[in-house]
Amino acid sequence: MAIQASIGLSAEKDPVSAAKEAVLQARRNLRAEKIDLAITFGSVDLFSAGLVKTLGVYLADTPIIGCSSTAIISSQGIYKRGLAVMLLSFPEGVYFNTACLRELGAKMPQAAGEELGEKLLYGFSGIRRDLGIMFSDGLMRENAKLIYGLQERLGSSFPFVGASASDNLRFSKSYLYFNHDIFSNAACGVLLGGKLNFGLGTKHGWQPLGKPRRVTRSKDNIVYEIGGVSAVNFYEEYFGYSLSKLRRELKLISVLYPIGIYLPGEEEYLLRNILSIENDGSLVFQGDVPEESEIRLMIGTKESALEAARQALEEAKKSLSGSQVNLVLILDSISRYLLLGRDADKELDVIREGLEQDTPLIGLYTYGEQAPLTAINYRGKAYFHNQTISILAIGS
């Protein structure tokens, strides 16, 4: 038997009304009687005590994971304000466990990832593990180290996907939902195994410009020198802009011209957005940039972003080897949303055109994605990404 999934969506402004409408709609569409897991994404203004209480009433003992998002992606369209709920019913032979780790700021990021991994593994002794899904606070600066820790426990090549929660582009507070509580500064996830058939595609569409450069001094997500000179020269040289003009144009430059990190054995560059330019000429990126890494300046267009979405879906479907797609989860970078602007719906159209008309689909816009790249020799190792679209397709 296949996994049963259904989607409920509400655009109500009131959290209580939104939760009630979304859950009841999803229940009506679910062909199975039992509900094993709920995944929910909502706009940041809906995350409140009313939402918690209402979901608790209608989903009682059902485990729930999810997070806030700048906009909600669903089978019905993209909504800047709303709540989407996906209800899942697993057939015999599929196992899962949910876990959450709070107060991440009080822990070393890698140690926190290891602890979350231990919690997810609880009860999986002797059971095949197939896939992990994780959501984390989008304002964490060291999400990459959280991934390293998680892989220490799950395995360096164990496939998992994840998203950093987003807010309404104010970058002030994002939220996680776990069971019947909401909080920030946390990470939660689900580990799935047994007899799970899934496919995953991760693409971005940005192409390299100019010659490769070497990061000669960096620490975590701060790059001090590129090619032995101040890091900001990398952008000053290309654009011919002064430091003050680079800062004024930073939002546009960060979206259109991120850096790409070359990873041996991987087909795609790993992208990094600039968060800020410091007075000493260092660049602060949204994610780690290892010292001695080879980087390129990258460029993206609306057309290349849409083509990347098509490729990501095809890659996910290919991994299913012709099996029917039962549900789709989309983790889409907020940078892509900003790049596409009014054409954001076209990206969703590209995905829907590649699926059966009634395929349940849910997704969010993230402040960072966690997923494997397509590897030449193997698949599995996950990275912290900027500007990608990751598509998870689960089939029968």
Image: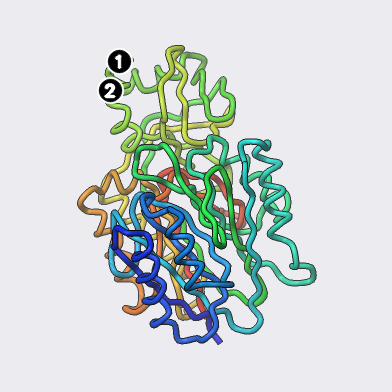
Q: Residue furthest right?
A: 126
Question: Would residue 176 be visible to someone looking at this image?
Answer: yes
Occupied quadrant, residue 249:
top left
Q: Nearer the viewer, residue 55 or 148?
A: 55
For the point 55% across and 34% down, which residue is it?
Answer: 288
Q: Which quadrant does the N terminus fall into?
A: bottom right
Q: Is residue 213 above or below residue 368?
A: above
How many C-alpha atoms fall within 10 Å of the one at disc 1: few (<14), some, or many (≥20)? Answer: few
Q: Is residue 186 above or below residue 249?
A: below
How many C-alpha atoms fall within 10 Å of the one at disc 2: few (<14), some, or many (≥20)? Answer: few
Q: Which residue is mark 1?
A: 244
Please report contact status of discs 1 and 2: CB closer than 8 Å, yes or no.
Answer: yes
Q: Position of residue 280 (x, y in %)?
A: 46, 12
Q: Nearer the viewer, residue 107 or 121?
A: 107
58 relative position to 80: left or right: right
For the point 36% across and 23% down, which residue is it?
Answer: 235
